[in-house]
Image (spheres, rainbow, N blue to C red):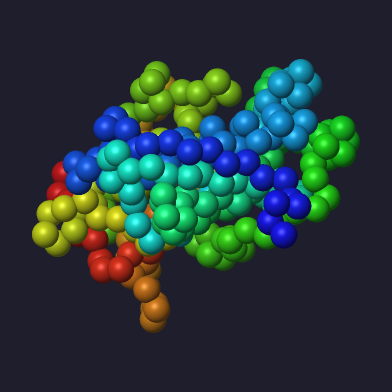
């Protein structure tokens, strides 16, 4: 039974400030819900921020995938469910967003590592953190591939300047910002906001206020079952490599808006 496994649920109503021009929740707001639910669940289970901060470390998100069937509109009541999934060299976590009738609107999976706050490098998870992680877990949705493909040649590039307001308590850009940036410069053929059916992100490096980034995109080549974009966020200078890599999947091709 599902209740035999450690999980956490919270209910809320979609707020006006969480929605886009179409009155439906933004994906960055959904990621905020996931981040909050994950932090509360990890704290309840004994491997939350307080434990890792006491060791001079912090949890960092290394991978996130969302499968989107529908985005709830403003005012709709939703239920967010999260649970710790498998632990290998990364800690995995599953999520669901359901409407008031219990219909699943969004499914997601994240993968987490531990970073040393002084060296800013990923380190081995401490033994007491591993001991607190549950051994009996539920499965979660798979990532779209083991490694996301590298973008070789872009068809579109959108500039982004990192702001102080983009930072989080770990001293770098919060992961939810990347979701919004990846959708910059994309519109539907009718001019409306396009909604991907899947978005898979790999977080590759930190970035900080004042940095100038480029969100680069191209349609996936070859025979594809779906409309897919290969995307990357990298420093405009070309130094330091990618900060984020992604694959987004669409029911119909989005249009690149000219900048």
Is residue 210 at all visible to an observer of this figure? no
Side (left or right) of 142 relative to 74: right
x then y, percent, for residue 147 = 58, 60
The image quadrant where one finds the N terminus is bottom right
Q: Does residue 55 sit above or below 80 in this rendering?
A: above
Residue located at (57% from left, 41% from top): 9
Residue 162's x, y, as percent? 37, 27
- Of the 4 image quadrants, the one containing the C terminus is top left
Q: Is residue 43 left or right of residue 165?
A: right
State the residue at coordinates (87%, 39%): 131
Vertical position of residue 89 compared to residue 75: above or below: below
Q: Is residue 51 left or right of residue 108?
A: right
Q: Residue furthest left?
A: 190
Count of labels in the image: 0
Q: Residue 39 location, x and y as percent?
A: 61, 32
Q: Which one is in front, 217 or 176? A: 176
As displayed, is residue 90 above or below residue 254? above
Of 101 and 179, nearer the camera is 101
């Amino acid at each position: 039974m599902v209740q035999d496994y450690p999980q956490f649920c919270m209910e809320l109503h979609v707020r006006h400030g969480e929605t886009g021009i179409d009155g439906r929740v933004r994906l960055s707001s959904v990621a905020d819900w996931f981040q909050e639910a994950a932090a509360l669940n990890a704290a309840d289970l004994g491997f939350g921020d307080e434990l890792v901060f006491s060791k001079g470390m912090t949890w960092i998100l290394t991978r996130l995938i969302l499968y989107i069937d529908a985005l709830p509109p403003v005012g709709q009541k939703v239920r967010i469910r999260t649970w710790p999934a498998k632990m290998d060299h990364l800690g995995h976590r599953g999520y669901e967003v359901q409407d008031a009738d219990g219909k699943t609107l969004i499914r997601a999976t994240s993968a987490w590592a531990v970073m040393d706050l002084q060296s800013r490098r990923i380190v081995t998870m401490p033994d007491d953190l591993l001991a607190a992680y549950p051994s009996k877990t539920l499965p979660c949705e798979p990532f779209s591939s083991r490694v996301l493909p590298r973008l070789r040649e872009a068809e579109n590039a959108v500039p982004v300047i990192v702001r102080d307001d983009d930072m989080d308590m770990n001293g770098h850009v919060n992961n939810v910002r990347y979701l919004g940036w990846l959708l910059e410069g994309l519109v539907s053929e009718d001019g409306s906001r396009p909604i991907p059916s899947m978005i898979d992100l790999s977080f590759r490096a930190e970035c900080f206020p004042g940095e100038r980034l480029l969100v680069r995109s191209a349609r996936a080549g070859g025979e594809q079952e779906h409309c897919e974009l290969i995307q990357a966020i990298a420093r405009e200078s070309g130094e330091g490599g990618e900060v984020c890599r992604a694959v987004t999947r669409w029911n119909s091709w989005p249009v690149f808006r000219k900048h």
